[in-house]
């Protein structure tokens, strides 16, 4: 009975395995990966039933062209993005929305510079690294840690299908071009849940996010205890 219900899915086992691996890993599948996205569209109802059995809801965003899984069962494993990934993801999500879809390609170095202009050093260090005492001074090592966390978060978000790294293999990652994808709206929605603000108020949303997630605490963990975004 099970095989009959999902017979169409199993006619293309290689594609099914690839789609299943990405979705269960917590990745978004976007229209940029037309082969996998088309498979999901063609088998949407069967896949929804399939993942419902496993304790997930398959979310399809037709208008913006991406899909992902959301855990709905207590028995379904949940993956949560780290502090720095969520912070950078929310910044890029707000950036994507503010651009009005007119500009989606950016250089990593320019984005980091914009973040430095948006927030003071303490708030930026708190968001990307860990809580620090008010009035602490910026040091070369702390600036290097901010840069490292920012670049690592971007690389990880690319693995999850939130952006595309256009210049793979560049020696200086800060000079790398990236393309933001509509799936970043998931982070933007997190910001909107935390605070009701006009879209152009990125700084205010980020600051509220820091406060809501308890980032003022002195701790070294990169994990978010509350308010973070689940991979699925």
Image (spheres, grey):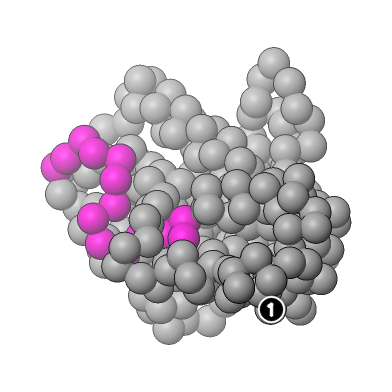
Query: Residue at the spot x=80%, y=58% of the render?
Result: 11
Q: Nearer the viewer, residue 82 or 213?
A: 82
Instruction: Write down the region rendered in magenta.
Output: 218-232
Viewer-closest of 226 and 123: 226
Q: Who's the residue at 46% across and 77% down the image?
A: 192
- Residue 41's image quarter? bottom right
Residue 72's spot in the image, x, y percent? 40, 73
Closer-to-camera residue (51/62): 51
- Which residue position holds label 1? 45
Q: Is residue 227 magenta?
A: yes
Whole-percent x and y of residue 179? 75, 48
Is residue 161 at least partly visible in the picture?
A: no
Can residue 156 be seen in the rendering of this structure?
Answer: yes
**Above/below status of 2 relative to 221:** below
Instruction: Tell me where residue 159 sits by quadrant.
Output: top right
Mark 1 Cα-neighbour bin, 10 Å: few <14, some 14–19, many ≥20: few
Residue 8: x, y in percent?
A: 78, 67
Q: Is residue 217 left or right of residue 38?
A: left
Question: In the picture provided, is 51 more to the left or to the right than 132?
Answer: right
Magenta-drawn stretch contains 181: no
For the residue pair 104 and 121, the one nearer the viewer reads as: 104
Instruction: Please determine whether, in this image, residue 141 is positioned above or below residue 149.
Output: above
Counting the numbered discs, the total is 1
Extreme front residue here?
Answer: 1
Magenta span main SS? loop
Quadrant of res 171: top right
Give the structural element (helix, strand or loop) at label 1.
Answer: helix
Extreme residue toward the top, this view: 171
Q: Position of residue 226 (x, y in %)?
A: 25, 62
> If the image is split into quadrants, where does the N terminus sit?
bottom right
What residue do we see at 38% from left, 46% from top? Answer: 82
């Amino acid at each position: 009975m099970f095989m009959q219900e999902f017979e169409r899915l199993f006619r293309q086992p290689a594609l099914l395995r690839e789609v299943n691996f990405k979705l269960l890993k917590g990745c978004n599948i976007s229209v940029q990966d037309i082969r996998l996205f088309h498979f999901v569209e063609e088998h949407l109802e069967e896949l929804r039933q399939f993942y419902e059995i496993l304790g997930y809801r398959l979310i399809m965003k037709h208008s913006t062209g991406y899909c992902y899984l959301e855990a709905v069962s207590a028995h379904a494993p949940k993956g949560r993005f780290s502090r720095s990934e969520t912070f950078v993801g929310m910044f890029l999500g707000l950036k994507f929305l503010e651009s009005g879809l007119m500009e989606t390609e950016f250089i990593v170095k320019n984005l980091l510079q914009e973040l430095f202009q948006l927030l003071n050093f303490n708030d930026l260090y708190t968001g990307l690294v860990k809580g620090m005492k008010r009035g602490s001074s910026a040091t070369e090592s702390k600036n290097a840690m901010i840069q490292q966390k920012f670049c690592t978060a971007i690389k990880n978000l690319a693995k999850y299908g939130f952006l595309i790294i256009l210049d793979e293999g560049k020696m200086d990652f800060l000079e790398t071009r990236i393309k933001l994808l509509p799936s970043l709206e998931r982070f933007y929605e997190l910001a909107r849940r935390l605070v009701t603000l006009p879209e152009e108020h990125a700084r205010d949303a980020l600051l509220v996010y820091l406060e809501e997630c308890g980032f003022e605490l002195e701790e070294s963990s990169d994990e978010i205890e509350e308010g973070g975004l689940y991979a699925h």
